């Protein structure tokens, strides 16, 4: 995105153009770096991206950055990545994703926040693995400006409100992504293999949450701590579900049903992902 021209204008074939319908918002299960070696999953993510209009910019909220007040990642081109993981093959620590300057995108994001709400910029923070791992698959050329937005809270109602603020960005060709995992009970896994059978708590929560998302039942979903089966095992901490509320909050209308795009399990955890109109 060239900061000397309108950030809504694109040049490439298939790129979203002003006047077109708002670009969808997404919730994706980002997995861990080994996602990059899963042929089926990478094919699903790549095919999903190919079916979307090519965005003018990408704003992604990852489970792996909790910071208040709302903060944006660094805007400089090719800001180094954050390798916020351990215990994986050394090859993942040498991967790069050198995205273009995102200053114009940052200006857009600030413009949709209410007066009096500070939005900070972290001058050196790059994309963490919740952002760059799936984006390497979906947009491998790294030629779209990308910014990461911090999670300022884990409260569903407040996250839905953040998403509502971001809704207008979709009218400008910005792809809003919530990146988490629909179940994330790592302490309770017993079979540490990618093809492990999912535990009952993972299946129960996955099906319950999917039903609520597809019906657009935000009230039920927001009460997951008290009403969802499989709790607290599915989410002993809730940061991996939190990005879902940002994506749903940016829907074209409150409670709009989402479309399921990816299903299945990875290490027994639900990788189900949704597209929000």
Image (cartoon, helix red, strand yellow):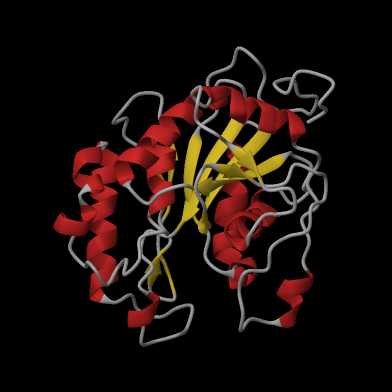
Question: Residue 86 occupies which quadrant of the picture?
Answer: bottom right
Foreground residue, 196 or 175?
Answer: 175
* Residue occupying the far left of the picture: 227
Q: Is residue 255 visible?
A: yes
| Closest to the observer, 223 or 263 | 223
Q: Residue 272 lies in what quarter of the image?
A: bottom left
Identity of the residue drawn at 36% across and 37% down:
160
Q: Residue at x 50, y 30 (%)?
A: 117
Image coordinates of residue 138 in percent, x first then y, are: 65, 50
Q: Residue at x 51, y 43 (%)?
A: 69
- Image position, residue 180 (x, y; %): 46, 57
Task: Residue 12 in the image: state x and y as whole percent.
Answer: 79, 29
The single residue placed furthest to the front in the displayed view is 116
Number of marks present in the image shown: 0
* Viewer can see residue 56: no
Q: Is residue 51 left or right of residue 206?
A: right
Quadrant placement of the C terminus: top left
Residue closest to the eye, 233 or 26: 233
143 displayed left or right of 38: right
Residue shown at 32% from the left, 66% from the top: 235
Q: Position of residue 57 (x, y in %)?
A: 68, 34
Name above or below for residue 189 compared with residue 21: below
């Amino acid at each position: 995105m060239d900061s000397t021209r309108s950030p809504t204008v694109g040049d490439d074939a298939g790129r979203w153009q002003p006047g077109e319908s708002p670009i969808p918002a997404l919730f994706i299960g980002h997995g861990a770096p080994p996602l990059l070696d899963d042929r089926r999953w990478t094919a699903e993510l790549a095919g999903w991206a190919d079916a979307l209009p090519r965005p003018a910019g990408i704003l992604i909220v990852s489970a792996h950055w909790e910071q208040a007040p709302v903060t944006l990642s660094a805007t400089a081109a090719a800001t180094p990545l954050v390798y916020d993981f351990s215990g994986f093959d050394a090859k993942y620590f040498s991967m790069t994703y050198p995205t273009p300057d995102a200053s114009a995108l940052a200006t857009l994001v600030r413009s949709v926040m209410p007066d009096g709400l500070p939005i900070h910029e972290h001058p050196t923070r790059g994309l963490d693995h919740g952002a760059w791992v799936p984006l390497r698959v979906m947009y491998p050329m790294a030629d779209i400006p990308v910014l990461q937005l911090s999670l300022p809270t884990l409260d569903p109602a407040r996250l839905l409100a953040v998403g509502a603020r971001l809704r207008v960005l979709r009218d400008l060709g910005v792809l809003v992504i919530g990146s988490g995992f629909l179940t994330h009970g790592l302490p309770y896994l017993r079979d540490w293999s990618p093809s492990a059978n999912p535990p009952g708590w993972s299946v129960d929560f996955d099906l319950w949450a999917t039903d609520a998302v597809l019906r657009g039942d935000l009230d039920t979903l927001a009460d997951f701590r008290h009403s969802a089966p499989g709790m607290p095992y599915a989410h002993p901490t809730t940061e991996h579900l939190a990005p879902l509320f940002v994506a749903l909050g940016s829907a074209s209308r409150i409670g709009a049903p989402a479309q399921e795009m990816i299903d299945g399990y990875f290490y027994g955890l639900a990788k189900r992902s949704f597209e929000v109109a």
